[in-house]
Image (spheres, rainbow, N blue to C red):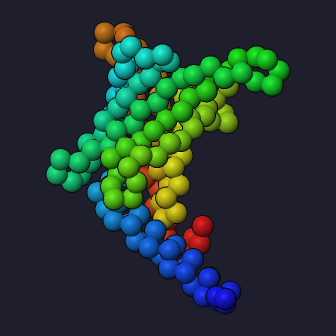
């Protein structure tokens, strides 16, 4: 029968390994902010948009895709739910799903913010509507990399 200390040591080793893998994955993210433009994806059941963000390394990029789906509430109303997916951040994960929500101060819900917690850093994805030069609607995507110091303990 394994002792409780042995089980805790195994968990600590796994956490240390996850931290090392996350730091390797984040090595290609040298800047604090990356930006791109979302383009609509044609012929989808629910409206969806995609954005490629070139990274600092050779031939590396992240792809962020999000879609809008109607969801029934318990009161039988329909709300719009925004879900996102990030791919391309290796070797940590192949894809990571997240929810996009309007920030607390945005009463109209025009901006959307998603959060991916990697334990040693938090990736924040922001979707911002704007108008292009010829007055057509665009959606700008921002990826913020907020690294945590070891003293944070979070």
The x and y percentages for residue 96 are 46, 46
The foreground one among 115 and 16 is: 16
Residue 105 visible to the viewer: yes
Where 112 falls versus 21 (above or below)? above
Q: Quadrant of residue 26?
A: bottom left
Figure disc tally = 0
Q: Quadrant of the C terminus?
A: bottom right
Where 33 falls versus 76 (above or below)? below
Residue 30 visible to the viewer: no
Q: Residue furthest front?
A: 1
The foreground one among 31 and 3 is: 3
Residue visible at 47% across and 56% down in the picture:
146
The x and y percentages for residue 103 are 62, 36
* For residue 129, side relative to residue 54 (left or right): right
Residue visible at 39% across and 59% down in the picture:
92
The x and y percentages for residue 68 are 54, 23
């Amino acid at each position: 029968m394994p002792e409780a200390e042995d089980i805790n040591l195994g968990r600590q080793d796994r956490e240390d390994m996850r931290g090392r893998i996350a730091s390797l994955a984040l090595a290609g993210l040298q800047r604090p902010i990356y930006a791109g433009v979302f383009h609509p994806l044609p012929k989808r059941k629910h409206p969806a948009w995609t954005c490629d963000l070139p990274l600092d390394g050779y031939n590396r990029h992240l792809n962020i895709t999000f879609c809008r789906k109607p969801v029934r509430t318990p009161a039988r109303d329909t709300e719009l739910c925004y879900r996102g997916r990030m791919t391309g951040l290796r070797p940590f994960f192949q894809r990571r799903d997240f929810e996009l929500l309007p920030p607390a101060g945005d009463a109209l819900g025009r901006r959307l913010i998603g959060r991916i917690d990697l334990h040693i850093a938090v990736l924040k994805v922001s979707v911002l509507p704007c108008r292009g030069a010829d007055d057509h609607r665009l959606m700008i995507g921002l990826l913020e990399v907020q690294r945590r110091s070891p003293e944070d303990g979070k």
